[in-house]
Amino acid sequence: MHYLSTFPQALARIWLFFVLLVPFALIYGIRDETMNSDNKVISIGVIIDGDSRIGKEQEVAMDIAAQSYNNTSKNYKLALYFKNSTKDTLKAIKIAEEMINVQKVQVIIGMQTWQEAAMVAEVGSKAQVPVISFVAPTITPPLMEARWPFLVRLANTGTAYIKCIAEIVQAYSWKKVVVIYEDNGYGGDYGMLALLAEALQDVDSMIEHRLVLPPISSLQDPEELVSEEMLKLKQTQSRVFIVLKSSLEMAIHVFKEASKVGLVDKESAWMIPESIANLLDSVNKSAISYMEGALGIKTYYSERSREYKEFEAQFRRTFWSKNPEEDNRYPGFYALQAYDSINIVTQALNRMTSRKNSSPKTLLREILSCNFLGLSGHIQLESGQLMQKNLVLRIVNVAGKSYKELCFWTQQHGFTTIHHAGQGGNKVAGNTKCFRGVRWPGNWARIPKGWNMPTEKNPLRIAVRSRTSFSRFVKVVYGQNGEPDKYTGFCIEIFEHVLNHLGYDLPYSYYPIDGTYNDLVQLVYNKTYDAVVGDMTIIEERLPYVDFTVPYAESGLSMIVPMKPGESAWMFMKPFTLELWLVTGAILIYTMLVVWYLEREPNPEFQLSTALWFTFSSLFFAHRAEMHSNLTRVVMVSWLFLVLIVTSSYTASLSSMLTVKQLRPNVTDIQWLKNNNKKIGCDGDSFVRTFLEKVEKFKPENIINITDEYKYNDAFSNNSIAAAFLELPYEKVFVSKYCKRYTGFTPRTRFGGFGFMFQKGSPLVKDVSKAILHLSEKAELKRLEEKWLISSQDCSNNVTSSNETNSLNLGSLWVLYVMSGATSTICVLIQTIKWLKSNQPHEDLPPEEGNGTPSDERVWKKAITFAKQIYSKKHNNSSKEQDVIDCSSRSGHASIADTPEHSEELASIPKDVHITPYNIGTLEPHTLQNNCHIRHCTNQL
């Protein structure tokens, strides 16, 4: 009976032994197959964090990939060995060595941190075992291939992700950001901060504050630490928070504590890292509810392919059976990445089927030559690194317990409306069209300022300089209790007008500051005050510390000097410039010669001297000579019109110069002041004194500080200074008050102008600048300038200029001179053409022998004849003899000058000589003079 009673127990023990023995035998059988090349079983070691959501997804995905391959492959079989990563670098080394030495793995896959991957790669390189890592360093270390030749990095570097973040910041014109970063304990990925700082600098932004948090695994109470750090962040001005690198657990703590202290509000913007955005498809919905309104950047992958749909269906069934506690069964990016890692190995094995040599180096070479479209994207390796070919990032917006897709980003096109990798889309880079429909933190639709905006409880703190040289710009009026009671002035009124055009309320408070302008810059730079309203000049040395709006008043360095009456004995010459005097004299001489040329023919008594007197007297309209030629009359009409305009202009200009009291400055040159060691005055509290010393090279002992506008007049009166140097707005005020005693020269040095000063990166700069431009375009700034800066209407036209009347120049009258000269020239040409036609030979005259047409010699003779005739005219007109007798008479009367010698000469002329205008030049002069008939011919010429 005892034997019968113990038999079932023995049978149960045998059955239990058999159940335990079979799996053990199978495991060791697989190991034996690993040693035996005929069985071709490939062992793969996997190091992942099996307790995390990412690790759970990776394990299921890799099991599915291995099972799928084993079911179809006849050459190789895969055996996976999973080990939990402890995120301890030393333990990772121990796990890798155990896998290589005990499990005899041919490939190691996994690792979640770069430190783990580097250490495992060190072990794998020594044992010649390929290591496929799911992470890659942000900045590739030098000589990586030489140090870790068996390392394959199945991850994109962070450069594209960093660039995408910078372009989002640029699209919204955020000037400052706060970066939150969870360190891994070794600082291995700290290069991401350096890359982000450089990328933000390229888009005119900067990192205001860096919050580096320790690994959450090293904290006993992470909630307390994060809460303290969030309270510190409230002191920063920026409200743009970029969670650059963080685990999901740490990110949840950050968002939860930030919400408690009011950092997740309507004016804030948050961005979550790629590692968390890639989990939005798979994590529990309650985990992301704290991140509502945040922007995320996901790695894009296609969900439309048949392979993905089949994988998704199988993944959901398997994942639910193994992890029933998870409420989301959809695969995320990391599951797809793990699935592709197994496919890399299997494709390499398939290419090794025909090869006899199956060494580790051959397997590594085949792994590196993989090129296919996987579930996570295009898989192509170069130098052991996954290529970022056609990398597409997807911009998402966390909404409630889910998210919505906004647009896409590529390195080639920036923000686009692309739908899937490899297709083009509409480029929308450089604006925020990509982000239409974003729901920001607090369910806010308007784009957040990204800045700690003023409120009624915390108004904008504005510093105002209470001690100014010119009170018209800023003036602080104190009450009976000694407290500031009123703020007035040109700058104050402009700022208050600007507030009315901002489009939103901006609570503010003024604070009087008794300090220099540089003190105000420092107070804004160290965030004691938010802004400065006053006569602050925009100069280069201040820009690294603060931001300025566009200028609302121009600025430049002007020199103020006393005026003295200008008296000159040559006052009568000033109405015209030297150029105009010379041209007037030239046209007078030219007109004189033209009149003489036109009048000499019909009026032999009109000599050159007569023409000079006639033309000159016409200047005073006192000419009396009679004109015989119609062409002369035309010339005189044009000339007299010119004379009328010129004399009237001269009279008016000279009258103005004699009527208005002429003033001229005592000093007109800065160099003269320096050469003569003269004293000058300026505002010592401004940058002007430094400028005069370093740029204009004035001696410091010759520069006198003047702190009040009324002291400038006293300094000039007692000859303490020879000149004063003021910025252009101050010069307008001073000269408008003393316009009859001082003058200001147009500035030869320009500055940036007067502008309102804010903290570096303040979004108010853009809004206030826009309002200033609106006031300028509506002429409001001009009206305010006339109201505050110009005190007297009598001086309004004399500001920054002297009373000296300008002389007339040739540019004012050149058309009249051209008309007169052209008319004279045309008349000369007409007269010359008429003379040439009247002296042509008659048609009935026989041509010269041997010549049928006029030759060059004939033309030359005509010119000589014409010259001789002019000479003969002048000679006859100057002779005191009586006119010759009428040669037309046939009575034979002789002149009283006839002598026997003359009679002989007349008798010597042949009877048959035919006298013509063409041969008259061949006869002797005395013969022509003593022949009545010939004289008659010459007179006709």
Image (cartoon, rainbow, N blue to C red):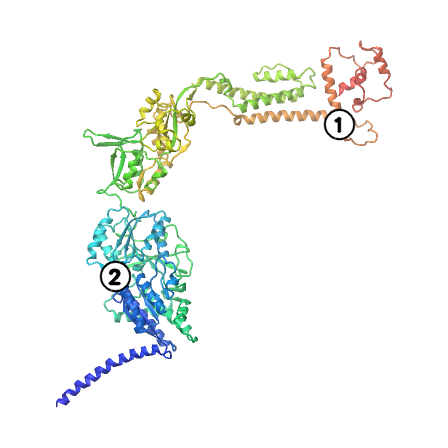
Q: CA distance from mark 1 to mark 2?
A: 115 Å
Crowding around mark 2 (Cα neighbors within 10 Å: few <14, some 14 to 19, many 20+) is some
The amino acid sitting under disc 2 is Lys
Residue 615 as seen in the image, left or right of residue 100: right
Amino acid on which disc 1 is placed: Trp
Q: In this figure, which residue is indicated by the disc labeled 1?
A: 860
Closer to us: mark 1 or mark 2? 1
Q: Assign a secondary structure to mark 1.
A: helix
Dot 2 corresponds to which residue? 285
In the rendered image, the residue lying farthest to the front is 126
In the rendered image, the quadrant that contains the N terminus is bottom left
Q: Residue furthest top?
A: 896
Q: Residue furthest bottom?
A: 1
**Which quadrant is the C terminus positioned in?**
top right
Tell me where residue 122 appears, x and y as whole percent: 34, 65
> Percent x, y for residue 453?
27, 44
Give the class, few, some or many, for how many residues have Cα within 10 Å of label 1's Cα (few <14, many ≥20).
Answer: few
Horizontally, residue 335 falls left or right of residue 595, namely: left
- Between 840 and 343, the one nearer to me in the picture: 343
- Name the spot of residue 729 as percent of width and height, x first: 36, 30
Report how many numbered discs are placed on residues in the image: 2
Q: Which disc is residue 466 wearing?
A: none
